[in-house]
Amino acid sequence: MKMVNLSIDGKEVEVSAGTTVLNAAEQAGIHIPRLCYEPDLSPWGACRLCVVEIQGLRNLPASCVTTVKPGMVVQTRSPAVIEARQTILELLLAGHPQDCLTCEKMGDCKLAQYCYEYGVKKSAVPETEPNYAVDDSNPFIVRDPNKCIACGKCVRACAEITGKNILELAGRGPGTRATTANDVPFVESECVFCGNCVSVCPTGALTEKQMQGKARRWEYQKVKTTCPFCGTGCNFDLCVKDDKVVGVASNPESIVNGRALCLKGRFGWDFVYSERRLTTPLIKRNGGFEPATWDEALDLIADRLSEIKAKHGPGAFASLSSARCTNEENYLMQKFTRAVMGTNSVDCCART
Ligand code: FES
C-alpha cells in the first residue's frame, strides 16, 4: 500500500494514500470538529466546520473531502481556522431556534457542543428564525425542520443505509431543510421508520418520539445488547435510566450491523414492559390455558413426547426452532431432536 507522509499540527503522520486530512488527523489523535461527516456515509463537505489551513493554499479546505498529499503541512487550530469555524457556527445559529432548555437533544446536540467549544453564544447576523410546522404525524419520529442545519446526514442515511431515498434537501439558503418528497408528513411518505436518519442527526431536527421527555443524555447509561427480533443478530445500545429501558441507540461499533437498525430493533423495545407478556408456563386443560409451575410443564412435555415416540416412532417428531433464540438455544434444540428423539427432522425459521 502506498503511504503518504505529512505534518498535522507539527506532528509527523504517515497514512495510506487516499486518506482524507480529517481521517489522517484522527489517526494522529487530533479531533477535527464536524457536523456533516459520518464514517458510514459518503462525504459531502457541506457544513465546512472541518476546515483546516494547508500551507500553500489561500482558502481553508474542508478536511473531510480533502485527501492527503506528500509533504502537506496542515494546521487544524490556527487563528484563521478558529475564526472560520466561529463564523460558520454563527451562521448556523442565525436560523436555529434557541429553545435548548426544552429541546430533546439537549446534552447530545453537536451544534450546542461546538458552540460551547468555540465560544459562540449568538449569531452575529440578523436572526431569521424559520417557522416550519413540526411533523409529529407518526408514532416513532418527531421531525422539527426548524432545527435542521442541512448537513444532509439523514438524506444520506436514508439512501445509503436504508436504500429508501425518502429524504432530500429542499429550499435554498437559510431555508434549506431536509424533508420528504412533496414535503408530506413522514406517515404519508414511503418511510419505513427504521430511524437510521434519527441516529445520525446532530441536532434536535429528528428525535425519537418514544424517548420524548424520558431522559436527558447524561441521565441514562448505554448498555450494549443483541436484538431479539430475528436471527441477524444486530447489536445496539439500550438506553437505561434508573434500571428501566427508555430507548434504543445505534452502536456504530457493532460489527454485525454498524449503525443500521430496522423498525423493530429500534422502536420495538416497549414489549419489555408489556402486561401481556407470559410470566409463567400455561397448560391447556378443559379447553383453556391454566397457569402451571415449570416442573409441571416440563414433566408434561417429557411424558407426552416419550409417549409419542413409543407409540409412533422417532419419525413422528420434528422440531422447528426460532431465529429469536440464541445460537446456543438452537444448538440445544437440534441436539435434543437428534440425540433424545432420534430423528434428523430439524429446521429453523432462520434458514429461509
Ligand atoms: Fe467536513 Fe462537514 S464535516 S464539511
Image: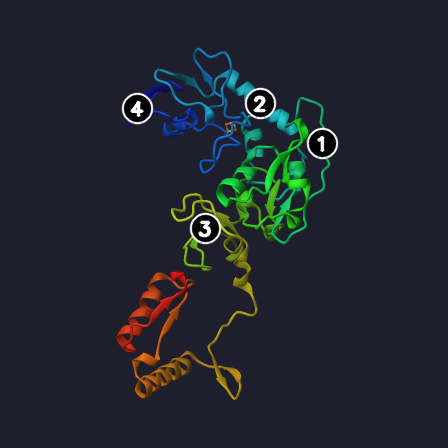
Label 2, label 1: how many angstroms apart (C-alpha)? 19 Å
Residue sitting nearer the eye, 232 or 248: 232
Residue type at numbered disc 3 = Phe
Q: Residue 189, image x and y in percent?
A: 63, 47
Q: Which of disc 4 and disc 1 is earlier in sequence?
A: 4
Residue where numbered disc 3 is placed: 236
Residue type at numbered disc 4 = Met
Residue where numbered disc 2 is placed: 86
Q: Quadrant of residue 174?
A: top right
Label 4, label 2: how many angstroms apart (C-alpha)? 34 Å
Q: Which of disc 1 and disc 2 is earlier in sequence?
A: 2
Residue where numbered disc 1 is placed: 129
Contact between marks 4 and 2 (CB within 8 A): the answer is no
Residue where numbered disc 4 is placed: 3
Residue sitting nearer the eye, 308 or 65: 308
Q: Residue 89, image x and y in percent?
A: 59, 26
Label 3, label 1: how many angstroms apart (C-alpha)? 36 Å
Q: Secondary structure at mark 2?
A: helix
Q: Residue 283, image x and y in percent?
A: 47, 82
Q: Secondary structure at mark 3?
A: strand
Q: Nearer the viewer, mark 4 or mark 3?
A: 4
Q: Secondary structure at mark 1?
A: loop
Q: Is residue 215 above or below residue 301?
A: above
Residue type at numbered disc 1 = Glu
Q: Residue at x 55, y 26 (%)?
A: 118
Q: Nearer the viewer, mark 2 or mark 1?
A: 1
